Image: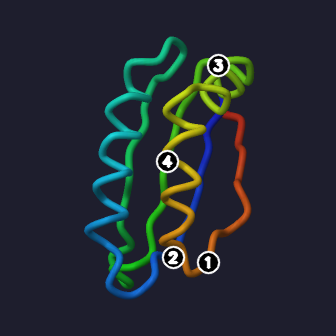
Amino acid sequence: MIRVVARTLVREGCLEAYYALAKELVEETRKESGNISYTLNQSAENERLHAMIEVWESRAALEAHMGSEHFKRLVPQMAAFAEEKKPLELYTEVF
C-alpha cells in the first residue's frame, strides 16, 4: 500500500471555494479503482492548513489517479487558492 499526505495552506478568505473543489475531488477519487481511502483533513491548530490523506493499493493506482480527468481539472484550480503547498509525502507501511 501507498499512503500519501498532500498538505496545503489555503489563502485567507478562500476556504469555501477551496472546499467546493476539494469536495468534488474527494467524491470522484473515492470511485477510483485502487483507492482505499481519500479524505480532506483540517489542522486542529490552523483552520487554513489542510492535508489530503490518501491510501492506495499500489503505486500504479496512485499514478492512474494523478492522470485522471478530475485530478487534472480540479487540482490546478485548488492550487490557485493555496498560499503555500508543501511537498507531496509518500509512505509505505512498515508494520
Query: Nearest the camera: 81 or 93?
Result: 81
Q: How far from the left and from the top, in percent, is residue 15? A: 32, 72
Where is 79 relative to 20, above or below?
Answer: below
Mark 4 → mark 1, Cα distance in angstroms:
17 Å
What kind of residue is marked 1?
Glu
Q: Nearer the viewer, mark 4 or mark 2?
A: 2
Q: Is residue 69 left or right of residue 92?
A: left
Report the quarter where the N terminus lies.
top right
Q: Quadrant of residue 87?
A: bottom right
Q: Which mark is residue 53?
A: 4
Tell me which residue sits at (30%, 46%) in the image. 23
What kind of residue is marked 4?
Ile
Say what secondary structure mark 3 lies in: helix
Tell me which residue sits at (67%, 34%) in the image. 93
What kind of residue is marked 3?
Ala
Mark 3 → mark 4, Cα distance in angstroms:
15 Å
Q: Nearer the viewer, mark 3 or mark 4?
A: 3
Q: Nearer the viewer, mark 3 or mark 1?
A: 1
The residue wearing badge 3 is 61
Tell me which residue sits at (55%, 27%) in the image. 69
Q: Quadrant of residue 25?
A: top left
Q: Which mark is residue 84?
A: 1
What kind of residue is marked 2?
Leu
- Specify few, some or many for label 4: CA neighbours under 10 Å numbering under 14, 14-19, or 20 or more: some
Say what secondary structure mark 4 lies in: strand
- Specify few, some or many for label 3: CA neighbours under 10 Å numbering under 14, 14-19, or 20 or more: some
Q: Is residue 71 left or right of residue 36?
A: right
Mark before the other along the chain sequence, 3 or 1: 3
The residue wearing badge 2 is 9
Q: Dots 3 and 4: beta carbons under 8 Å?
A: no
